[in-house]
Amino acid sequence: MAVASGMHDIVLVGGAEKMTDMDDVSINSVLDATADAEWEAGMGVTFAGLHAMIAQRMIHDGIATREEIAAFSVNSHFHGALNPNAQFRKAITLDTVLKSGPTATPLGMFDCAPISDGAAGLVLCPLEDAKKYTDSYVKVSAVTQASDTLALFQRPDITTYGATVAAAKQAYEQAGITAQDIQVAEVHDTYTVTGIMALQDLGFYKRGEAGKAVLNEECHFDWGKVAINTSGGLKARGHPIGATGVAQIVELVEQLRGSADKRQVQNAKYGLAQNTGGTGSAVTVSILEAM
Amino acid sequence: MSSVAREWREVPGRYNLKGTKCTNCGTIYFPRRDFCPKCRRAGIGKIEEYDICRTGEVYTFSIVHDAPAMCDMIKPYAVVMVKTDDGVMIAGQLVDVELDKVAIGMRVRAVMRKLSTDGDAGVIRYGYKFVPAE
């Protein structure tokens, strides 16, 4: 916005986080603070617990099976193995996810984004000036943000993030495209279940169909449908919280420039990034376009 | 975690499930709201105190194994979202229950229990937890 309004000519956007300075119990308390501190976290309902309750209800309502939810982690690790900058560069099987130690049932350790250190950066400038500095730039076609109640239990439906739906709708309008025009997307899989929700809320799949597609490996970079989390996502690339949003954009830039090497999506024209705060209480959606 | 003023302000809701109801549209709010976001101006002066029904059923649940410091002594433990019999959703713990018996649809009721201690010398926070109703 600072660039688009003309207030600044060039802006360097940086994101960084060093989570390993804290022990894991303290990190949990920090994560819990992104939920409602009094009526959720203060009741002993953890951040993982909230997402686990979403997953439990999705399974109950027939929106996704436990295996379909777990498959999101397999997809992230499949891509992480192809990204030299990922925290975890190793493919895993569905069994690894299903048999991982429980954090909050039905979710296990391999359903949860890791504790990470990391940083990412971007340079923004007016589109007409970009060619002065580089031959390989991409266009920012949309950046939107939407919010919802802080507490999950205050929403009419806990198996969808209304803020993702609203931000995505605005973003598609800004960019003048639809969900079907996107070839590559980075979605916020803090937990596997939020990845499945994102695919439905962003309009890539109908409710009840995202899980099946992920389990069927249709989100791989070379399948031909919208490629999901080619960086490895939060699960395998890593989730240094303050850097994650910028890192998502960096991956889209690599894809749209055609410099994503072994995980390159063919003919990628539009890329979308969805970043979430709390249990979907704040969501941003960005759309980038190859030039 | 807690300031004394905030603790006192939230005690009625946490101890006794006191919420509010907009008599203009009928929506029940928990935690309490003194302003109805649906009716906005039309709801001003029409918000009444409301006692949330203390019984309901489990809407969704999870067994938490990776606990924050305040719950480290009781893990693993059950967390639930309960839909009360007057249709209000509340998040909390389900206690006095065998963890493998927790299920969606299970009948529960709210009781008052100790929630946490703010360090060795701080205030003890009390509030609702749920127990099986039958």
Image: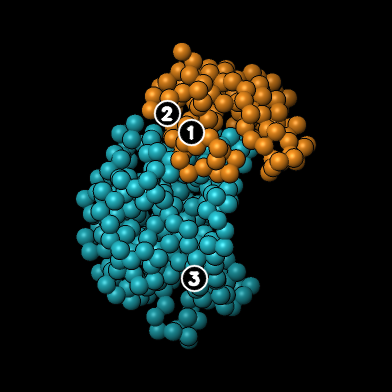
Chain colours: A cyan, B orange
Q: What is the quadrant of residue A148 in the picture? A: top right
The amino acid beneath tag 2 is Leu
Q: Where A107 sits versus A175, above or below?
A: above
What is the x, y in percent for residue B41?
68, 32
**Mark 3–mark 1 CB contact (< 8 Å):** no
Neighbor class of circle 3 (other Cα within 10 Å; few <14, some 14-19, many 20+) is some
**Other-residue count near label 2 (Cα within 10 Å), few / some / many at <14 / 14–19 / ≥20:** some
Q: CA distance from mark 2 to mark 1?
A: 7 Å
Which labelled disc corresponds to residue B99? 2
How many discs mark residues in the rendered view? 3
Q: Secondary structure at mark 1?
A: strand
Residue lying at 21% horizontally and 60% vertically, measured from the top left: A223
Displayed quadrant of residue A250? bottom left
To which residue does mark 3 refer? A120
Secondary structure at badge 2 equals helix
Q: Which tag is nearer the camera, tag 2 or tag 3? A: 2
Query: Of helix, strand and loop, which one carries label 3?
Result: strand
- Most extreme residue toward the bottom is A132
Q: Earlier in the sequence, mark 2 or mark 1?
A: 1
- Amino acid type, label 1: Tyr
Give the class, few, some or many, for how many residues have Cα within 10 Å of label 1's Cα (few <14, many ≥20).
many
Q: Residue at 56% of width from left, 75% of height from top?
A: A12
User: What is the residue that sits farthest to the right in this orientation?
Assistant: B5
Q: Residue furthest top?
A: B134
Q: In the rendering, at what x and y percent does residue B28 appear?
A: 59, 24
- Chain ID of residue with mark 2: B
Which image quarter: residue A262? bottom left
Mark 3 and mark 1: Cα distance apart in space:
38 Å
| Residue with the mark numbered 1 | B77
> Which residue sits at x=47%, y=36%?
B76
